[in-house]
Amino acid sequence: MRSRLRTVGSDRAVSRRRKALAGRGAVSWGGAMRRSQELFDRAQRYIPGGVNSPVRSFRSVGGTPPFIVRGRGAYVTSADGRRYLDYLGSWGALLLGHAEPSVVRAVRRAAQRGTSFGAPTPGEVELAQLITRLVPSIDQVRLVNSGTEAVMSAVRVARAATGRDLIIKFAGGYHGHADHLLVDAGSGAASLGVPSSAGVPSRVAGLTLVVPYNDSKAVRRLVHRHHGKVAAVLVEPIAGNMGVVPPQDGFLRGLRVLCDAERALLIFDEVITGFRVALGGAQALYGVRPDLTCLGKIIGGGLPVGAYGGRRDLMSRVAPSGPVYQAGTLAGNPVAVAAGLAMLQRLVADPPYRRLEHLTLQLCRAVEREAQRAGVSLVAQRVGSMFTWFMGERPPRNEQDVRATDAARFSQFFHAMLAEGVYLAPSPFEANFLSTAHGDREVERTIRAARRAFRNVRG
Ligand code: PMP
């Protein structure tokens, strides 16, 4: 494990970066962001780094994050009164956009009946049944409060079922912040330059083996070297936490075959991709059936929900049916479940996937064209409505390729877009998301913004 914690954003470095960005006119530190700046200054006194999740801090792009006070449809409004066209979508959770009326109605109704009981509620049964209907590999599902919990618990089930300890994950894959999964992790850990975390015992991290994404041979070699000891291969079927990197042809299928041969379990972490790329998730899109699946984000409709599920013989090992302990005071919370149900019911009634795919394709192609015209090297990677604009010449296949893209140029582009009122994920190593509230008008607006933004980006 690399346990070195590299502090990328020392205060002096951050302040230097701020000045440089302000000098380029990319960020307004004056009136336009005054309220957010005040809030951020105050936040930093009371909350580590001023945020409750690292990547919100803008450390990897520099500058002050706008504090958001409300959202509607495809737009959010900051405490400074600025309106942004939003491609963050609460990191993918908001497939129907902000404050979608049916979700808000469901939340209000549920809250009026009581916010938590710590006892079973009918909504949980309905949500679990719907998930198992939509994702055929899931016979039984357990609701938890976050993606982190979902993956942590799925790994525990895999270890219990196989009687083995080792886990294989992919470099740049992020699966939440459980000790054994913070090894060569993407997302905030990638953008902070913290490949793993301080405080993770090396003996724990040593149980997690890491290989490059999309490298079937490397996985095979690793599994053979540790023959009989690998409990599970854990993968984001479409990598999202190093930016969007799709699986190459046969990669996921190869993992399935390998796991079967080695009697290891295949765990798909579909916290991002579940209900994002298809109703049945990435596993439906690529036709590969995992043993266990982790879900989050969309199934909570913007409230905190995660889930893990899979084959009945595996899930029946979970307490109280079996010996794998996992619990939660607020798990299956009635308000969160109501939001998730409302969201999934809308998706079932009117699946938006084809339209979203078309719109995202249009957006990505047009922005690539604009970049080309401006002499800026940019490649779009996309699956369905999730995309990343990498500042480079070639489509990245793995974390190493991603890290070779130009992060400094991405920061320029990011801030130029923000100044144009377009809010992208604040890191070169993250996915952006469209929602059903995005339409042609939003796409055209983004293309125009990008055209102007490229003038502030050095090719
Ligand atoms: N797995 C994946 C693929 C994720 O993208 C994330 C969060 N971005 C997680 C797990 C962890 O989820 P949470 O932040 O809800 O704990």
Image: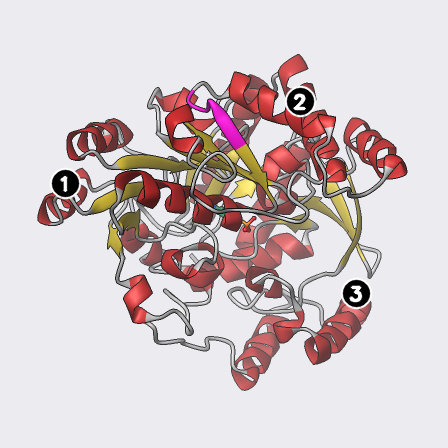
Q: Is residue 2 visible?
A: no
Q: Residues within 10 Å of mark 2 (few under 14, many from 20)?
A: few
Q: How many marks?
A: 3
Corner quadrant of residue 331: top right
Residue at screen point 61% across, 52% down: 417
Decide: is 282 above or below 17. above
Relative placement, left or right, of 22 versus 223 is right
Which disc number belongs to residue 126? 2
Q: Is mark 1 within 8 Å of ligand 1?
A: no
Q: CB under 8 Å between callouts 2 and 1? A: no
Residue ID for mark 3: 32
Q: Label 2 sits on what residue type?
A: Glu
- Residue 371 % position (x, y): 47, 45
Q: Label 1 sits on what residue type?
A: Arg
Q: CB under 8 Å between callouts 3 and 1? A: no
Q: Earlier in the sequence, mark 2 or mark 1?
A: 2
Residue ID for mark 1: 220
Q: CA distance from mark 2 to mark 1?
A: 40 Å
- Residue 39 % position (x, y): 78, 71
Q: Is mark 3 within 8 Å of ligand 1?
A: no
Comparing labels 2 and 1, the label whose residue is closer to the camera = 2
- Residue 387 % position (x, y): 49, 39
Is 140 covered by the magenta stretch? yes
Q: Earlier in the sequence, mark 2 or mark 3?
A: 3
SS class of the residue under badge 1?
helix
Relative placement, left or right, of 44 versus 292 is right
